[in-house]
Image: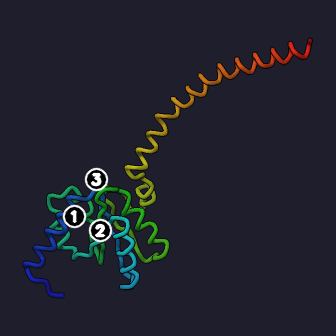
Amino acid sequence: MFLTRARKSEIVEDTKTALESSTSVIVADYSGITVNQFTQVRRQARDEGVKLSVVRNNLIRRALEGSKHTCIEESLQGPVVLAFSQENPSAGARLLKNVMKELPELEIKGISLEGRWVNPNDLDRVASVPTKEEAIARLLSVMTAPVGKLAQVLNAVPSKLVRTLVAVKDQKSSET
């Protein structure tokens, strides 16, 4: 497909904007996947807040100049799709991990997490990173657990005293 110079500049700027606003970028080889299958993947990505983009490798390289995600440049070989995760760094990894179960043709070539190279074999680890809400919930449960245990201990002392007094009362009433 022939692209004009203006259209190429527009694609580079769009890709650069997506790179700047992304916390993680995943490069995947999509050869062997049909158009219908790829449309389904795009639909899932939209639902999960992941932007998928198929761009020529040389245009991606131009967009990567000065970006924090330059570490993925070496993985740009062959037909690739970029998965951009804006808010949740593990959203793209979770999406592609689930898609790979149905489409084993999809191959992860590179992962950039906050500008650091992550081995494609570590996709499971990246996918298991909790979302912001999950992390806050875990932190709060860890912080409230000691307070809950303290309340149980403090409540146990009067309860034990009351049970002891009831037992003494029952013993005295059975003696008389």
User: For residue 21, which quarter of the picture?
Assistant: bottom left
Image quadrant of residue 46?
Answer: bottom left
Q: Mark 3: which secondary structure? A: loop
Which amino acid does the dot numbered 3 rest on? Glu
139 over 150 or under it: above or below: below
Q: Element at badge 2?
A: strand
Q: Which residue is mark 2?
A: 51
When the figure is inspected, residue 118 is found, relative to residue 145, above or below; the finding is below
Residue depicted at 15% across the width and 87% down the height:
2
Q: Position of residue 50 (x, y in %)?
A: 33, 66
Which class describes the residues within 10 Å of circle 1: few (<14), some (14-19), or many (20+)? many
Q: Position of residue 70 (x, y in %)?
A: 22, 59
Q: Is residue 139 left or right of residue 61?
A: right
For residue 103, side relative to residue 38 (left or right): right
Q: Is residue 10 left or right of residue 75?
A: left
Q: Give the alpha-carbon distance from disc 3 to disc 2, as whole Å.
A: 16 Å
Categorize mark 2 by other alpha carbons within 10 Å: few (<14), some (14-19), many (20+): some
Q: Is the C terminus in the top left, top right, bottom left or bottom right quadrant?
A: top right
**The N terminus lies in which quarter of the figure?**
bottom left
Give the residue number, with chain letter if any, for mark 3: 114
Q: CA distance from mark 1 to mark 3?
A: 13 Å
The residue at the point 65 percent across, 24 percent down is 156
**Are the residues tagged 2 and 1 within 8 Å (C-beta)?**
yes
Q: Which residue is rendered at x = 76% and y = 17% of the image?
A: 164
User: Residue 113 placed where, x, y %?
Assistant: 31, 55
Placement of 35 over or under 118, stated as above or below? below
Q: What type is the residue that disc 2 sits on?
A: Lys
Q: Is residue 57 above or below residue 73?
A: below
Mark 3, other Cα within 10 Å: few <14 / some 14–19 / many ≥20: some
Q: What residue sits right under mark 1 in the picture?
A: 18
- Secondary structure at badge 1 equals helix
- Choose between 75 and 37: the one closer to the eye: 37
